[in-house]
Amino acid sequence: MEKPVVTIEYCPKCGWMLRAAYMAQELLTTFSEELHGVLLQPSEVSGRYNIRVNEEPVFDRKEAGRFPEMKELKQLIRDKVSPGKSLGHSDKK
């Protein structure tokens, strides 16, 4: 079974590439065994910041009205790629 790919689609005009790169680094560190990789995808639509596992939406900035917290994002990704995985301190409320 092929490992999933997380795609972070971000608006380059909004200056969100560094945020996307930081989130990619965190996800690759946390899920080094579970993910095939993280793709940073510049959006052609202004203001977009979406995160998907394969093609399944996980987080949409416009729907949420905010960016995801790192702890929250790790939990969302974990629930899709490795539901039994402990995230240590990120699992605590």
Image: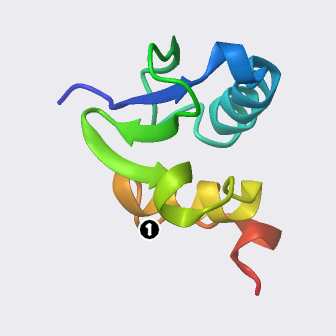
Q: How many marks?
A: 1
Numbered disc 1: secondary structure:
loop
Near mark 1 (Cα within 10 A), the count class, few <14, some 14-19 or many ≥20, is: few
Q: Quadrant of residue 26?
A: top right
Q: Is residue 74 above or below residue 54?
A: below
In the visual, does 35 lie left or right of 17? Answer: left
Residue 63: percent from the left, percent from the top?
46, 60
Residue found at x 50% / y 26%: 9
**In the image as oriented, which residue stretches furthest toward the bottom?**
93
Residue found at x 66% / y 28%: 24
Q: Is residue 39 above or below residue 92?
A: above
Of the 4 image quadrants, the one containing the C terminus is bottom right
Q: Is residue 4 above or below residue 81?
A: above
Disc 1 marks which amino acid? Answer: Gly
Residue 69: percent from the left, percent from the top?
74, 59
Residue behind mark 1 = 84
Q: Quadrant of residue 65?
A: bottom right
Q: How is the image coloured?
A: rainbow
Of the 4 image quadrants, the one containing the N terminus is top left
Q: Quadrant of residue 92?
A: bottom right
Residue 4: percent from the left, percent from the top?
33, 32
**In the image as oriented, which residue stretches furthest toward the front?**
46
In terms of depth relative to the viewer, which is nearer, 59 or 39? 59
In the visual, does 59 lie left or right of 10? Answer: left
Residue 60: percent from the left, percent from the top?
47, 51
Residue found at x 81% / y 21%: 18
In the visual, does 31 lie left or right of 1? Answer: right
